[in-house]
Image (spheres, rainbow, N blue to C red):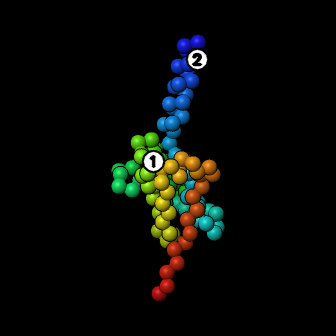
Amino acid sequence: MRFLLILIVFSMISRGQSPFNARIIDASTKEGIPFASAGIKGKNIGTVADEKGYFELNILKCDEDDTLKISAIGYKTKSFTITQIRQLGAKVIALDLLTMQL
């Protein structure tokens, strides 16, 4: 019985430590955005997406009101609170193209 209780508690703890995995895509083409940046504003926590737009970020040490900032050259930046990220179901973040007039 104790072993089962320990196993359940360990399972709950390890589930909370899993990193946040997501994919950053172009909102119009639905293709992954290679090498987009994902980082926690004001903290030394961040990463770069792979060539297909996938990234993994450990948000365990983040506060609920910390902000995750997603950016890529040529796209509008998006920001989410850690609370929003933890509630994000699809784990796909779509960025819109940045249009500039000359």
- Residue at 51% from the left image edge and 54% from the top image edge: 50
**Which x, y percent locates residue 29?**
64, 67
Label placed on residue 101:
none
The residue carrying pointer 2 sits among few (fewer than 14), some (14 to 19) or many (20 or more) residues within 10 Å by Cα, namely: few
Image quadrant occupied by the N terminus: top right
- Residue at 57% from the left image edge and 54% from the top image edge: 23
**Which x, y percent locates residue 15?**
54, 34
**Residue nearer the viewer, 82 or 28:** 82
Residue 16 can be seen in this image? yes
- The amino acid beneath tag 1 is Glu
Lower sequence index among marks 1 and 2? 2
**Residue nearer the viewer, 62 or 72:** 62
Label placed on residue 4:
2
> Comparing marks 1 and 2, which lies closer to the viewer?
1
Disc 2 is placed on an element classified as helix
- The amino acid beneath tag 2 is Leu
Report which residue position mark 1 lands on.
64
